[in-house]
Image (cartoon, rainbow, N blue to C red):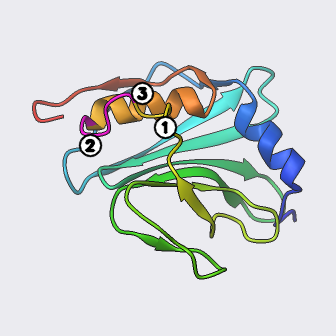
């Protein structure tokens, strides 16, 4: 069972174009809510998951072995500052990216051009999907308060 990726494999998976697996419509979660949406590569050899809660958004890749394994490639957090393994602290929001040997334990400042409107949770989702190379996004409907 694969439990770790090389950095080059993780970077390639993050950049790989991702597509929705079907036409299921998902409701954008209200505060405190969450959803998990399956995605796949164009050739359907790689599967991914877009996990959305109103406090963070994550992209994971799934591998099939004896048991299912999920590795976070990117996660955007808005809940609290983060302390990295080297004791440096990153503020809010911050971006966790897979780092070989550490998984998603390292966080970084959000790139200046990544979020077009950090105060709009819907726009944050759209920007995150672009950052993660989701070229055919899942169907997500906005709620009354999203």
Please provide percent x and percent y for residue 65. Answer: 84, 59
* 90 vs 28: above or below: below
Q: Give yes or no for residue 134 being in the magenta stretch.
A: no
Q: Residues within 10 Å of mark 2 (few under 14, many from 20)?
A: some
Report the residue marked by disc 3: 126
State the CA–CA distance, disc 3 to disc 2: 14 Å
Q: Nearer the viewer, residue 27 or 103?
A: 103
Closer to the N terminus: mark 1 or mark 2? 2
Report the residue marked by disc 2: 29
- Would you say 54 lies left or right of 36 here? left
**Residue pictured at 72% horizontal, 60% vertical:** 68
Q: Residues within 10 Å of mark 1 (few under 14, many from 20)?
A: few
Q: Quadrant of residue 103?
A: bottom right
**Residue pictured at 85% horizontal, 57% vertical:** 5
* 121 vs 10: above or below: above
* 23 vs 60: above or below: above
Closer to the N terminus: mark 3 or mark 2? 2
- The residues colored magenta run 116-120
Q: Tell me which secondary structure the magenta stretch mostly adopts.
A: loop
Please provide percent x and percent y for residue 93. Answer: 39, 54
Q: Give yes or no for residue 117 being in the magenta stretch.
A: yes
Q: Secondary structure at mark 1?
A: loop
């Amino acid at each position: 069972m694969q439990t770790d990726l090389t950095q080059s494999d993780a970077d390639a998976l993050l950049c790989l174009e991702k597509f929705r697996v079907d036409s299921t419509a998902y409701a954008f979660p209200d505060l405190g809510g969450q959803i998990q949406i399956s995605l796949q590569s164009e050739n359907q050899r790689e599967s991914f998951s877009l996990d959305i809660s109103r406090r963070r958004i994550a992209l994971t890749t799934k591998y099939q072995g004896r048991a299912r394994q999920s590795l976070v490639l990117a996660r955007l957090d808005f809940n609290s500052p983060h302390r990295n393994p080297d004791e440096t602290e990153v503020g809010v929001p911050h971006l966790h990216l897979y780092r070989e040997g550490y998984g998603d334990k390292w966080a970084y400042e959000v790139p200046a051009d990544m979020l077009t409107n950090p105060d709009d949770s819907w726009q944050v989702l759209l920007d995150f999907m672009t950052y993660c190379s989701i070229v055919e996004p899942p169907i997500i409907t906005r709620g009354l308060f999203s």
